[in-house]
Amino acid sequence: MLLLIQYTLIFASVLVLVALGGCFSEHSGVVNIGLEGIMVIGALGGALMMKYVPAGLAAPVVILLVILSSVLIGMLFSLLLGVAAIRFKADQTLVGTALNLLEPAAAVVLVRAINTAESVDNVSSTVAYGTAKKAFIVNIGRFEFNWFMVIALLLLAVSYIVLYKTRFGLRLCACGEHPQAADSVGINVYKMRYAGVLISGALGGLGGLVYITAGVSEWKFENGVAGFGFLALAVMIFGQWRPVNIGLAALLFGLFRALSNVYTGFDALVALKLPSTIYNMLPYIISLIVLVFVSGKSRAPKAEGIPYDKGQR
Amino acid sequence: MHKNSGKKENILRNSAFQTIIASLLCIVLGLFVGYIVLLIINPAGAGEAIVAIMKNFLYYPSAAAATKYLGTTLVKASALLMCSLSVLFAYKVGLFNIGAAGQYVVGVGACLYFALRFNMPWYVCLIAAIVTAALVGGISGALKAYFNVNEVISCIMLNWIGLYSVNMLLSQVKEQSTPYTKALASANKSALLPNLGLDQVFSKNEFVTLGLPLAVVMALAVWILLEKTKFGYELKATGMNKQAAKYCGMREKRNIILTMMIAGGLAGFGAGIFYLTGIEQWMVQQTAVPAMGFNGIAAAFLGGLNPIGTVFSSYFIQHITSGGTYVDKTMYCTQISDLISAFIIYLCGFVLFFRLWLNRFLDKRDEKSGRNGQKGGKA
């Protein structure tokens, strides 16, 4: 039971972070389908930092360095989407999909290049984190408390305040609802959209880092993040683009995802004798069902996915 | 107006020509970026590696071996062509079928299960693959039409559900000792697609079958359906503006569902003509959806969203993907080709802007030469 709570919380943290990323990007008017790829590349940034960070550093410094490298790499790669979608008015779905293919491939190529350089026989795409990962975890009894849970909760609160209580957030939302109107009152729509995409890159990268540190001490990058970026988008839609609802939706999805890790610990579930594959499918099936119920009266930002053209009225 | 302003501009203004130029530019830039990445990883063998990727089967010195592997590349390209047609067909109707990958997987599951469990002949297996994949595509279509569920997200979810279900299903027909499904050649010969003598053309490559010409025929069929029939026109109209189509008396919900079913069927067909050649067995512990469907997106856009164009672009994408296996593995990995094709898709996003820019550039030039012409006339 404790294990279930632990996994639920950690997976929910991932989903909250990435879904908030999508939320910022979409509120600015850019659909970020490339979150999956950004997660992978952000995870890679963090994993490499954990691998190469000197062993003697204090835990808070390690945490800060690893998070920073994930966030920065995530932002850097989200710019690929930003430039294409904002400056060059490219099809956002197409570019996002390209990022989903590009970034995992880049991660695998890079990791294998590093591994092969270390020893010619090593052709795996696995990064081991070494001892640095311990900095993130505090054991409270049998409960493995992870600092990321707090970080996710904090960022959720910050996102709520930023989106609804600050000038920046309200302007950001205006650019996603009616960019022409926003422009007419002197808001720079392009800048706002870049801001939205960069924030989504930062949060997506961080989410990727949390995902690959959940309960394991190495990551095989050929596996990517198994559709988690898209689950996060489903969470965002289920949460109707609002931070608090996103938090609750993430808990629900996190629970189903956690079940596939720990269902063997529950006698009632084992007694059902379902194949483990069913539990693996569960989050995806649930998200499909949920989408059926919430997509009809969707509160998506009205101008999302449409490139902004100053000349168009 | 531009029509009168000289013959030289006409070819640059021709939209088909612009598309071809744009695609070629994407390819050149994509390969260039691949080369840069290779240089960064290890400057010593970069030149050799990029040549290996572009040479693919020409890597073999003997003509017979090269022809044989050309056949293998073509077989893979034919499956890729079907996936890219699937993406293209949906995109023409305004839907982004990222689920081609999952529909392909479900097609694999259906055809192999019918072949290995029920010992059916190849045509039944092929039809099973098409129908099942079409149904999966139809789910996404129905969710979009009736519940306004974003088709990209529902497709991704169905990709994973499809992958896990197929793994579960095909575990029943796998070899005892390995995670692979039984080989068709030994378990059920009647499920293999007929060769029609094509294997002789490609130095006895027994995997070259009826599937190859069928794939090209399907490309033509898709082109005719989209460009020459009333049904195709209705579908495209629905894609352009759902409300307008409804207002004109078209059944827009039915059209969306049918589109996704046809797209799914095309992907399933691709799965059938690939796996029913016996070229590969399914690995039932697969943890990732095969890349075929995603490469289909690359091929569809690289081909300028034209069914005939995709025949060539599919071949190209498969050519460099297969070529990736020939790079020097002590320095590089085969995924470098995936990186190149992913970058090519990314560049395809800029095609629209490129054409706008080109047209604006031509307009400016025309304006200038027009003014000069007038001046010359006066003097």
Image (cartoon, coloured by chain):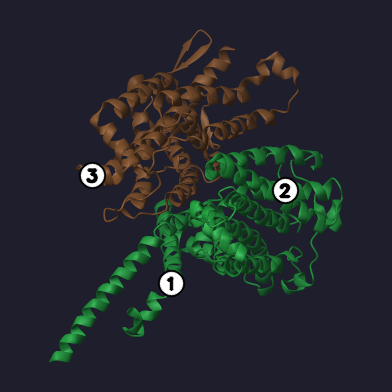
The chain to which mark 2 is attached is B
Look at the numbered disc 2 and give the secondary structure of its residue.
helix
Chain A colour?
Answer: brown
Q: Residue tagged by mark 1?
A: B15
Could one spot residue B331 in this view of the protein?
no
**Mark 1 touching mark 2, by CB under 8 A?**
no
Q: Amino acid at mark 2?
A: Thr
Q: Quadrant of residue B178?
A: top right
Q: Residue tagged by mark 3?
A: A188
- Circle 2 packing at 10 Å, graded few (<14), some (14-19), many (20+), is many
Q: Amino acid at mark 1?
A: Ser
Q: Residue at x 34, y 41 (%)?
A: A176
Q: Residue tagged by mark 2?
A: B132
Whether residue A222 is situated above or below residue B34 in the rendered picture: above
- Circle 1 packing at 10 Å, graded few (<14), some (14-19), many (20+), is few
Q: Where residue B313 sits: x, y (%)?
A: 54, 65
Q: Where residue B181 sits: x, y (%)?
A: 77, 45
Q: Where residue A18 sits: x, y (%)?
A: 43, 32
Q: Residue at x 65, y 63 (%)?
A: B78
Look at the numbered disc 3 and give the secondary structure of its residue.
loop
The chain to which mark 3 is attached is A
